[in-house]
Amino acid sequence: MASERIAEYEERMNKTIEYLKTELQAVRAGRANPHVLDKVKVDYYGTPTPIQQLANVAVPEARVLQISPWDKKSLKDIEKAILASDVGITPTNDGSVIRLNFPEMTEERRTELSKDIQKKGESVKVTIRNARRDGNDAFKKLRKNSELSEDDEKDLQEELQKMTDKFIKQVDDMVEEKKKEIMTV
């Protein structure tokens, strides 16, 4: 019974962690990473389409991302979509493939990215704490309606707090790992 009541909040916290993973994958760390293109949509015959569905995205060198479209007619559209996106890299089109050359990051840019990652982590922690608050409110309501005993309410709140602490630690670890990756030259 108790685990069923907690499961909903654990699911919300898990989704928040998945969101953070996705966000951190898209952060450029000076190396070519195909995930920086995840949010870029190409207008392909009037339909916004992810680049990964139109082309093969490869990393031939540490700081080069190569996009080989299956339909060569879409080359210009892919190039246009990358230019319009917030990737921040100008594509090089040689007529058959598009290359994105990732520049070496400056210390200033690394620090800026590190702060941005910290903000994302804090935002996710707030979301996790909100799930905990919603859970505690729901437990109080059940207690008020005499559907839960006082001891059961306390047990559920303690279990929810332990789960919250676990997820907050996970967020801190993910943020620290990404910051270390970015600060490594």
Image (cartoon, helix red, strand yellow):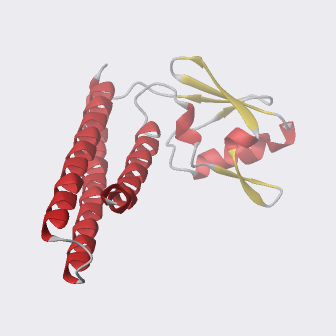
Image mark count: 0
Q: Nearer the viewer, residue 158 or 38?
A: 158
Can you give x and y, in whole percent of width and height, for residue 162 in the image? Answer: 19, 48
Examine the rendered structure and indicate whether residue 157 appears above or below residue 104.
below
Can you give x and y, in whole percent of width and height, for residue 39 in the image? Answer: 57, 49
User: What residue is drawn where x is 38% and y is 46%?
Assistant: 17
Q: Nearer the viewer, residue 121 or 12?
A: 12
Examine the rendered structure and indicate whether residue 25 appears above or below residue 183.
below
Q: Nearer the viewer, residue 75 or 53?
A: 53
Examine the rendered structure and indicate whether residue 94 appears above or below residue 144.
above
User: What residue is drawn where x is 25% and y is 45%?
Assistant: 118
Quarter of the figure with the C terminus: top left
Where is residue 59, by image quadrant? top right
Can you give x and y, in whole percent of width and height, for residue 99 in the image? Answer: 64, 28
User: What residue is drawn where x is 41% and y is 54%?
Assistant: 11
Can you give x and y, in whole percent of width and height, for residue 4 in the image? Answer: 38, 59
User: What residue is drawn where x is 65% and y is 51%?
Assistant: 41
Quarter of the figure with the N terminus: bottom left
Query: Furthest residue to the bottom?
Result: 145
